[in-house]
Image: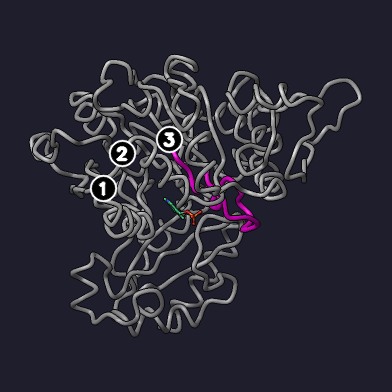
Amino acid sequence: MKLDTKCVHAGYTPGNGEPRNIPIVQSTTFRYESGEAMGALFDLEAEGYFYTRLQNPTNDRVAAKICALEGGTAAMLTSSGQAANFYAIFNIASCGDHVIASFDIYGGTFNLFAVTMKRMGIDFTFVDPDCSAQELEAAFRPNTKAVFGESIANPALTVLDFEKFAAAAHGHGVPLIVDNTFPTPVNCRPFEHGADIVTHSTTKYMDGHANAVGGAIVDSGKFDWTKYPDKFPGLCTPDESYHGVTYTQRFGLGGAYITKATAQLMRDLGSIPSPQNAYYLNIGLETLSLRMARHCANALAVARYLKGHPKVAWVRHPGLEEDPYHALAEKYMPSGTCGVVSFGVKGGRAAAQTFMAGLELASIATHVADAKTCVLHPASTTHRQMSDAQLEAAGVKPDLIRLSVGIEDPEDLIADVERALGKV
Ligand SMILES: *Cc1c(COP(=O)(O)O)cnc(C)c1O
């Protein structure tokens, strides 16, 4: 199946007389006829469902679709993108370990790494995504367990240099984990460029309609944990909390990582999405490729309009030929990037506020990547307590406006922006 067909069909093939849509299995538990039959499930000797905190058939079918879209070997859903990134790293790093991450990542992920996981004893080194191979090299320590980046960073719109990050990670015997939320597998498939694990906030384009918060983790099955048993004991030695199973032995390279994340982390931390939310996500996935094409075309049209406007100071979108990340975007996501554009209006913070107030169609929302165009001015909302100097130091320009371009008619969107700029 080609990607557009997978968006519609992958993950679920109904049998004769079965529901055409993925059924919502709204049940916490599953019945068994004997204690032995259920015991085999607990020992991971038989496949099946026993409790929705670990696994649910609706969730698994939707995960299987995302797995097919990314070209992986195994996948799982989580209740949020935050949970996906936490599990992806905590599955292979513990107290005393170290992880390298690009500095240009989503603010929530940065906080998760730099504050919360740091409190758990995992150390992070943040590197400039544009650093040289030597600088990246210098960030590694003997206890480094993974390298992390976003294929297109939210909100910096930096495109990841996959080749550079993958080469460094693999040179040190650790996997490259990539958050592929912004381009989605429609525009970028990180496994084809050296990534080993992919994560998603499905809350964004995958759901696409602002219906349900969710996340996903996909394994490429390509990273050979067994070559580094000392680095990854959790995957290569018996798990006493699971009857002595050795994940790489029992489930192979294709299944070990996700099985461990499900059997240990989901069991103990329980960030499982509701089957109802997985169902909504699947409806979004069916139209993902259609919507991504429209988001990208609209974003490019709006970005080009802004670029030519005398009241606009600067515009960033990796689809623009003159953007500093255009060459990397052409290399890793030639058919499109994402629908997010950032720009500045001449006149700084005050002008940005006037512009925002003048919009009628675009809504002011702390969200990105759904069907409806929305806009955020960090300096007057999420970062409003900061002075202009503090904002600059944090890499957020006082005039920065983040526009998440939806799938409306581009003429209406441009007219809205034109009207609002007229008031500045
Ligand atoms: C939103 C986002 C997250 C966090 O996802 P939630 O679903 O909000 O928990 C992680 N990474 C990226 C790139 C995001 O845009």
- Magenta stretch secondary structure, dominant: loop
Colouring of the image: one colour
- In the visual, does 86 lie left or right of 367? left
Q: What element carries label 2?
A: loop
N-term mark: 3 or 1 = 1
Disc 2 vs disc 1: Cβ atoms closer than 8 Å?
yes
The picture places residue 278, in percent across and down from the top left corner, at 66, 45
Circle 3 is placed at which residue position?
Answer: 198
Q: Residue 122 carries which label?
A: 1
The picture places residue 94, in percent across and down from the top left corner, at 30, 41
N-term mark: 2 or 3 = 2
Depth check: give the residue in front, 400 or 217: 217
Circle 2 is placed at which residue position?
Answer: 93
Query: Which label lies toward us, 2 or 3?
Result: 2
The picture places residue 26, in percent across and down from the top left corner, at 77, 46
Q: Is residue 66 visible?
A: yes
Q: What's the residue type where badge 3 is placed?
A: Val
The number of callouts visible is: 3
Q: What's the residue type where badge 2 is placed?
A: Ala
Q: In which quarter of the image is residue 154?
A: bottom left
Q: Is mark 1 on a helix, strand or loop?
A: loop
Q: Is residue 112 above or below residue 355?
A: above
